[in-house]
Image: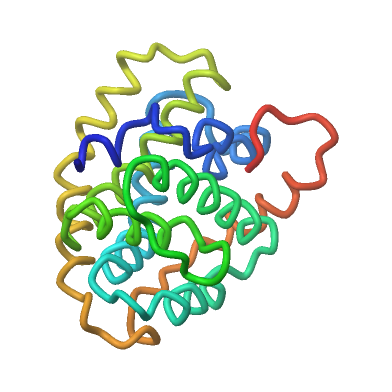
Amino acid sequence: MLLVLADGRLPSGGHAHSGGLEAAIASGRVRDVAQVGEFLRGRLATSGLVAAAFAASACARTGRWLDLDGGLDARTPSPALRKASRAQGRALMRAGRAMWAVPDIGREPHHPVALGVLAHAAGLGPLEAAVAAAHGTVTGPASAAVRLLGLDPYAVHAVIAGLAPDIDRVAADAAARVHDPVDDLPAAGAPLLDIGAELHATWEVRLFAS
């Protein structure tokens, strides 16, 4: 079930999002495989940790999803990123309802909350939800990097493989905090991603939605 949930072919809309990489490339901060690796490592340590913690908590805390969703709103200062997260959450919930009995949580949730809800519906635990979230944080932008920069996909996947221990560590850290109050969950920020997302949203021509 974890493989189903983490599969990049799951029709959850992730292929339309670069996780901020398109804006980073346009600004000149990312130009090659090595810099893609640095970008992914930074994204995993910030957005990835937050996503993994909220996905794990959403999987463990049935009935408290709205509190978690509000907590993610507070951790997402960029309106463009909030919109992108909810768009992916909506698509993920639609995909999940085709496979499992998924409850209605009362709103279109942020993507990590939707991921945790689906993980619970699929019979997975908080650690698996955190793994799927942390994994998706790097694989989505990595796939976008191949398309945006014309990079060797084998080299990019080697970068992902090198990040595997970090993904496992972030997921374990996130899963260990499922009983923390929402306000105490990770709130690691990435200001350049926020700024880039707002600039990216103004572009008339772009390959990715975010």
Say which of 68 and 48 sits in front.
68
173 above or below 199?
below
Residue furthest toward the front? 101
**Which residue is rendered at x = 22% and y = 57% of the image?**
170
Residue 83 falls left or right of residue 172: right
- Residue 87: x and y, percent? 60, 50
**Which residue is rendered at x = 42% and y = 76% of the image?**
68
Say which of 38 and 150 sits in front.
150
- Residue 38: x and y, percent? 38, 41
Say which of 11 and 77 sits in front.
11
**Which residue is rendered at x = 39% and y = 51% of the image?**
42
Residue 118 falls left or right of residue 140: left
Image quadrant holding the C terminus, namely top right
96 above or below 7?
below
Quarter of image, res 130: bottom left
- Residue 81: x and y, percent? 61, 57
Residue 96 falls left or right of residue 15: left
Q: Count all numbered tags in the image, as a single digit.
A: 0
7 above or below 154?
below
Image quadrant holding the N terminus, namely top left
Say which of 118 and 149 sits in front.
118
